[in-house]
Amino acid sequence: MASSLTKDAAAQGNPASGGKTFFGHPRGLATLFMTEMWERFSFYGMRALLVLYLISGGTDAKPGAQGGGLAMTMATASAIYAVYLAMVYLLAMPGGWFADRVWGPRKTVIIGGCVVMLGHLTLAVPGTAMFFVGMALVALGSGLLKANISTMVGHLYDGPQDPRRDGGFTIFYIGINVGGFAAPLVVGTIGQSVNWHLGFASAAVGMGLGLLQFIIGTRHLAPLSSTVPTPLSIEERNSWLRKGLLWLVVAAVFYGIVVGTGTFTLNWALIPIALLGLIIPVSVLARIKRDKDLTSAEQTKVSGYIWFFVAAAVFWMIFDQAGSTLSGFAEKNTADTVFGMHFPSTWFQSVNPLWVMALAPVFAWMWLALAKRLKEPSTTIKFAIAMVMIGISYFVFIVPMGMSSDGTKVSPMWLLMVYMIQTMGELCLSPVGLSVTTKLAPEKYASQMLGVWFLAVTAGDCIVSLLSTAGADLSGVGVLSAEATLAVLAGLAIWLNRKKITGLMGDVR
Ligand code: PHE
């Protein structure tokens, strides 16, 4: 599926071929595959437990479910979950910067992996403070790791023209989804059925295994992965340190006053972070768009890109609720037995990766068959389809939501169907989105654009967080249909403006 994932993100090729291969690919791909598989295993494992742990012991928990959680309401849990995900993707940008200017991709990934592991180990210790510190560490570590490991896949090939490159990214994406599929089955089951903290600890073990693989296989990686492309000068470093310290002092004084005067509530942290998660993406795009260094052709392309970016934000806004709104529904309103056998509700979190693995080959075949007849839809049309799909998934979701209002447990088939429709949308949007991001990127911002793409996820998640803190019921038919309508309208807007958008894209298709 990710045949075009980060296509040109690391265009400076540095083939590390020769010697043993991995399915006909450089041996280093196996190392990156295993590392990302385990990182995603720990990430999605923890994500499957997150909301259930937060509501456990509170009024919104399922009667009879394991206690020992933080007893929050579903609204607060959803807001925390969304802000956490937003931060993971926001931090991909500084993660890329650290690799570019300070440590180089290889070292950044090792440091990121250690921080992620430490984060999960912290979550393994009970307590509210430990929980928030652990979550911050996981977000920080994932930010350092996620984009850089994709960049290193690119380094294994001889530039964007290497015929094996697309296949390499597809194999890598399978690694992501194998990890995402296994995580809820292992981490989810242990955490939900045995003990939350043991579950988080098992996520740490997963990241540890990934890190070990990475360190052992490090000699198979491209030499380019160990270099720092544009090292930071001493003056720049000092200026960054000064600025960082200043902001830290400002934040410390501000929160010192809020806490000191006894006014602090969780919203004092959630709302500013969620607002930042909206302000930063908008200002980054505005800065790129207004940059005087860009040629007029580049500027036009950025205008075209903004269409895709906004659509993607709406898409991820719905898609990322898989672990909150959909997870809550799986836990409380869906039958948890098939053929008389009981299963934990976190298993539903394995459904999306399973659909990705099942449907990605079908989509690859379909695009190829359509291309042969010169009928493959353009990026613009694929985006429009994705938006309509994610909208439909929520319109479908309203049906079981209504059926369960009298306490009826609905068939698991409903969630399987909702996830299937969402995955079909994902396969139309996610890989093409990454590809079009790198293709429309102005030269000056080439190495940062992957981080910009992830900012669409940040923006979408922050909208959800703000909605939840403002008191909107994310599981209510009103909000669900509003989100679904918004997505369908966004799809329609793209479709109606397809000629305009294609015009803005210039030579990019
Ligand atoms: N599931 C994929 C991954 O974890 C794609 C994805 C990226 C989905 C970002 C949502 C947000 O890499």
Image (cartoon, rainbow, N blue to C red):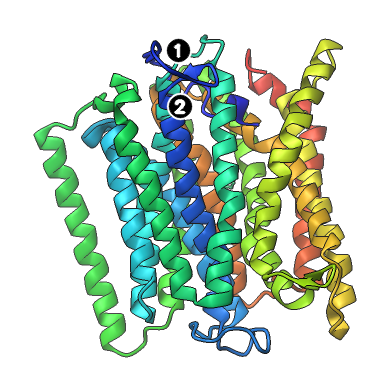
State how far apart marks 1 and 2 are (Cα): 15 Å
Query: In the image, is residue 11 above or below residue 65?
Result: above
Q: Is residue 320 above or below residue 237?
A: below
- The quadrant where ligand 1 appears is top right
Give the quadrant of residue 61: bottom right
Position in image of residue 142 (x %, y %): 40, 50
Q: Nearer the viewer, residue 124 or 339?
A: 339
Q: Quadrant of the N terminus?
A: top right
| Residue 204 appears in the figure | yes
Q: Say the numbered circle drawn on residue 456.
A: none
Q: Residue at x 29, y 40 (%)?
A: 108
Q: Alpha-carbon neighbours of circle 2 within 10 Å: few (<14), some, or many (≥20)?
A: many
> Amino acid under label 1?
Gly
Q: Nearer the viewer, mark 1 or mark 2?
A: 2
Counting residues from the start of the chain, the first of labels 1 and 2 encountered is 2
* 279 left or right of 224 in image: right
Q: Find numbered disc 1 in the image and state the secondary structure of the residue it sits on.
A: loop
Q: Identify the residue position indicated by label 1 in the image.
A: 159
Residue at 50% across, 57% down = 85
Q: Which kind of residue does numbered mark 2 sit on?
A: Leu
Q: Say if mark 1 contacts mark 2, CB within 8 Å.
A: no
Residue 29 numbered mark, or none: 2
